[in-house]
Image (cartoon, helix red, strand yellow):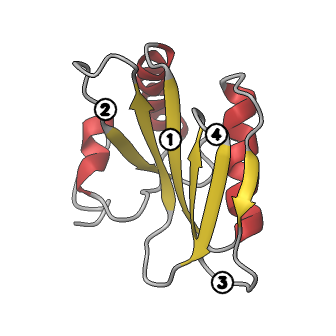
Amino acid sequence: MSSKDIEICKLEDLDKLRSAPKLNKNQSEKLFNELRSIINKSDWLTIGIMSPSLEIGINIIRRIEEKFECNKMKCISLPSSEGPIFLKANQKTGEIHARIEFGLGEGILISCQNYDNSLTSKTIGPFPLDFFD
């Protein structure tokens, strides 16, 4: 389903998309406030980024760390060649892993995790690559 087929008004509207939609300022602000509320209730985040390059992916991680005052994560495994990447960052372990992966959409996926196993984690997104600018 393309983002042109649905109106993006709340986080759940992103669930049906493979690639991040273009959002206007009002949509971005509304979604960010909703996301921030969920993040503030979580113990740690895992972040997935589908990006055209490693540099863009790492820059997005750094912006998220700043925005939510997270500790800086370390790059553990990175691709040795250029290309589209899937990057996974885990705030609990402090590690970032990335691999070249063709055929993905673009966007940011956020999973809010909790130490309490009775609370379910949910992956939210995809958000546009510039969502946390």
Q: Which residue is mark 4?
A: 132
Please determine whether, in this image, residue 28 is positioned above or below residue 84.
Answer: above
Q: Nearer the viewer, mark 2 or mark 4?
A: 2
Residue toward you, 27 or 105: 105
The image quadrant where one finds the C terminus is top right
Which element is circle 2 on? loop
How many angstroms separate mark 1 from mark 3 (CA)?
A: 22 Å
**x, y percent for residue 123:** 34, 42
Is residue 40 in sight in this rendering?
yes
- The residue lying at 73 percent from left, 41 percent from top is 73
Please tell me which of labels 1 and 3 falls first in the chain. 1
The image quadrant where one finds the N terminus is bottom left
How many angstroms separate mark 3 from mark 2 (CA)?
A: 30 Å
Q: Which residue is mark 2?
A: 121
Q: Which mark is residue 46?
A: 1
Task: Name the side, left or right, on which 125 lies relative to 52.
Answer: left
Q: Which residue is mark 3?
A: 83
Using a 10 Å C-alpha cutoff, classify the residue at mark 2 as few (fewer than 14 neighbours), some (14 to 19) or many (20 or more).
some
Which element is circle 1 on? strand
Disc 3 marks a residue whose amino acid type is Gly
